[in-house]
Image (tube, helix red, strand yellow):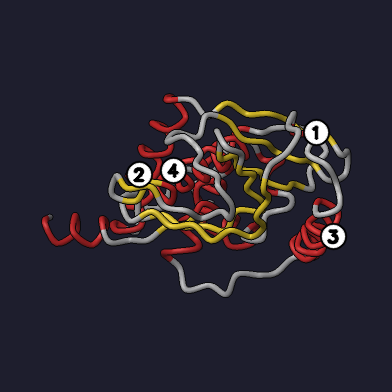
Amino acid sequence: MMGSKKSSLSIELTVTDIKQYFYCPRVIYFTYCMSLIRPTTTKMELGKQSHWREESLQKRRTLVKYQLIKGERRFNLRLRSERLGLSGVLDMAIFTRREAIPVEFKMSTKGPSLNHKYQLAAYAMLLEDELFERGKPRVICQGPLRPRRYVRRGFIHYIPTRRVHEIEVTANARKHIKDALIDMRRMIAAESIPEASRRKNRCRDCEFTRFCADIA
């Protein structure tokens, strides 16, 4: 039992895993517990291309959509928290004198989903740990900017509709993320497959559909 616990604590996870877990936990099982070559779908490739185009557009635009007059933007920001055993690449971060604000670009037209909200909250937690490693302020932005310790909000920018949604980073969301990290590590260490998602419409675009159908 002790060996299993130790191995589960050493499992490094990503913010994308957080997103996938709240969409369907079986994606985590297939990613970490089965030696599968993860298929690259057309949708995934189109998503990458749209992110590159959006980054180029963002560099030329003001911050009005984010309710800001000025701020420093950083793109594709690599973040890691030793405390959480979590890492990820944030699409964009906006730094002002008072705030660090994570921003995620999405290709969906439906608006904020639960897994997107938790993904953004996870990036907020990574930003906090990067800004204040071991209690000491770090500078991951240029200029005389010293954002406060806690990241209280973020934005999800939906590329097809050009709509921006502000998402509050709550204590409840932080707790759900920490609980999810524990559950994912236990699942991976035990190689225990979770129940299939009850929302079968989500299976339509999933790259693991054919593997999942064989098990279910």
User: The N terminus is located in which quarter?
Assistant: bottom left
Q: Give x and y (percent) for residue 79.
A: 49, 57
Quarter of the figure with residue 57: bottom right
Secondary structure, mark 4, is helix
Q: Nearer the viewer, residue 26 or 55?
A: 55
Mark 1 and mark 2 in contact? Answer it, CB < 8 Å.
no
> Which residue bears the numbered disc 3?
53
* Nearest to viewer (mark 3 / mark 4): 4
C-alpha span from label 2 to label 4 = 23 Å
Q: Residue at x 51, y 51 (%)?
A: 15
> Which residue bears the numbered disc 4?
128
Secondary structure, mark 2, is helix
Q: Nearer the viewer, residue 43 or 138?
A: 138
**Sequence-first tag of 3 and 1:** 3
- Residue extending farthest to the left is 2
Secondary structure, mark 3, is helix
In the picture shown, does residue 135 fall above or below 209?
Answer: above
> Which residue bears the numbered disc 2?
183
Q: Nearer the viewer, residue 135 or 116?
A: 135
**Sequence-first tag of 3 and 2:** 3
Q: Residue at x 78, y 39 (%)?
A: 63
Mark 3 and mark 4 in contact? Answer it, CB < 8 Å.
no
Image position of 142 (left or right of 43): left
Mark 3 and mark 2 in contact? Answer it, CB < 8 Å.
no
- Residue extending farthest to the front is 144
In the picture shown, does residue 140 fall above or below 151?
Answer: below
Image position of 132 (left or right of 37): left
Q: Which mark is residue 65?
A: 1
